[in-house]
């Protein structure tokens, strides 16, 4: 039996607040939450018809019966395979033909697509399909044993797990030229991540994946699980050395202000500031602050971006990671977006 799709109000409610979402068009996968309405939740129930378990996003297809009795095919996009594995959901957890319930955010471009956050398997077991904080919808969350390890104190040198998604401190204000570029950018076709092109700074830091700081004396090595990116932070120089060539992640100069690591990055050679097509110029400058909480369990992050050709005033984003003992940086191995195939 293939069930219908419906809108629901908030997590853990079953009240229908609208008619079946009238969506049409072919499904195209994409990296980031830009093409989805994150303020609306949709629940679907149907049969899994195709599975693609990969980075940067797990993708499923589901056959859903609408209110007219017609079968529709929906495309579902979760976090990366790495993220779902950390949530206890693997490729072997889902079978073709299995009837499941899935909840998430619908497309804001009139497509039968869902940014999936929750899945209820036929076995009655619920999983999150994202590492972003989301409430459980159909079952109670499993008990989590909290490991404690105070031996590292306030040291930044460890693996940090994702805690809070990046958010602007206030809306960014774009120049006219930047706004025109954003208006003409189509994330469904132009987003570099679709072809496994890793982002530059600052977007490289604004992702829901673990990161690791390694003390190498004159440098701090910052490993980022997404795209297997590595930043070397120069802790010795007072200014950018002569003859440094611009690069995707730029050149990073770091210093300590008390227990806070401050990093200034320039020389970034990448066309976009974000996944929404905001252009980035060679004048861009980013100043980051990494601050470990007094109990050593949280890493707060701030990045202040200036780019006069594209931004009016300062653009500030905040995010956070948390200390979860045992978390490891996993291989990423991105695969370019292609049509789904069964199996």
Image (cartoon, rainbow, N blue to C red):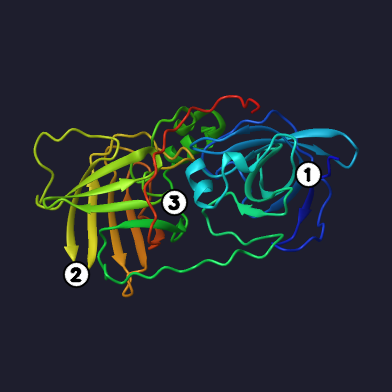
Pick the quarter of the image with the N terminus. top right
Q: Are marks 2 and 3 in contact (CB under 8 Å)?
A: no
Q: Nearer the viewer, residue 186 or 145?
A: 145
For disc 2, the marked residue is: 258
Q: Are marks 1 and 3 in contact (CB under 8 Å)?
A: no
Q: Nearer the viewer, residue 332 or 108?
A: 332
C-alpha separation, residue under disc 2 versus residue under disc 1: 53 Å
For disc 3, the marked residue is: 173
C-alpha separation, residue under disc 2 versus residue under disc 3: 32 Å
Q: Nearer the viewer, residue 280 or 11?
A: 11
- In the depicted structure, whether residue 305 falls above or below residue 250: below
> Comparing marks 2 and 3, which lies closer to the viewer?
2
Residue in the image at 57% along x and 47% along y: 89
For disc 1, the marked residue is: 21
Say which label, 2 or 1, has the lower sequence index: 1
Residue in the image at 36% along x and 64% along y: 300
> Comparing marks 1 and 3, which lies closer to the viewer?
1
- In the depicted structure, whether residue 126 falls above or below residue 243: below
Residue 175, numbered label: none
- In the depicted structure, whether residue 149 falls above or below residue 221: below
Q: Secondary structure at mark 2?
A: loop
C-alpha separation, residue under disc 1 versus residue under disc 3: 33 Å
Residue in the image at 31% along x and 75% along y: 294
Q: Secondary structure at mark 1?
A: loop
Q: Percent x, y for residue 115?
A: 62, 45
């Amino acid at each position: 039996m293939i069930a219908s799709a419906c809108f629901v109000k908030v997590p853990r409610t079953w009240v229908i607040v609208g008619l079946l979402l009238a969506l049409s068009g072919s499904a195209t996968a994409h990296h980031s939450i830009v093409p989805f309405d994150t303020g609306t939740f949709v629940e679907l129930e149907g049969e899994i018809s195709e599975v693609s378990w990969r980075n940067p996003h797990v993708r499923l297809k589901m056959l859903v019966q609408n209110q007219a009795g017609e079968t529709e095919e929906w495309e579902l996009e979760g976090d990366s395979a790495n993220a779902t594995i950390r949530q206890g959901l693997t490729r072997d957890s889902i079978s073709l033909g299995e009837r499941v319930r899935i909840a998430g955010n619908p497309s804001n471009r009139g497509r039968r697509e869902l940014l999936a956050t929750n899945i209820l398997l036929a076995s009655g077991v619920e999983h999150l399909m994202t590492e972003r904080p989301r409430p459980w919808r159909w079952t109670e969350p499993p008990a989590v044993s909290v490991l404690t390890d105070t031996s590292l104190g306030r040291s930044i040198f460890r693996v940090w797990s994702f805690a809070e998604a990046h958010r602007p401190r206030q809306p960014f204000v774009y120049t006219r030229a930047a706004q025109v570029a954003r208006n003409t950018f189509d994330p469904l076709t132009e987003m570099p991540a679709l072809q496994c092109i890793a982002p530059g700074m600052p977007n490289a830091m604004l992702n829901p994946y673990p990161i690791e700081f390694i003390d190498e004396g004159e440098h701090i090595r910052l490993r980022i699980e997404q795209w297997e990116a590595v930043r070397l932070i120069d802790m010795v120089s007072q200014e950018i050395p002569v003859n440094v060539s611009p690069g995707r992640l730029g050149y990073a100069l770091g210093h300590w202000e008390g227990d806070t690591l401050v990093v200034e990055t320039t020389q970034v050679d990448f066309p976009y500031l974000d996944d929404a097509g905001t252009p980035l110029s060679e004048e861009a400058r980013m100043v980051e602050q990494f601050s470990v909480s007094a109990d050593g369990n949280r890493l707060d992050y701030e990045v202040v971006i200036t780019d006069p050709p594209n931004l009016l005033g300062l653009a500030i984003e905040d995010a956070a990671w948390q200390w979860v003992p045992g978390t490891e940086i996993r291989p990423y191995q991105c695969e370019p977006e292609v049509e789904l195939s069964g199996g």
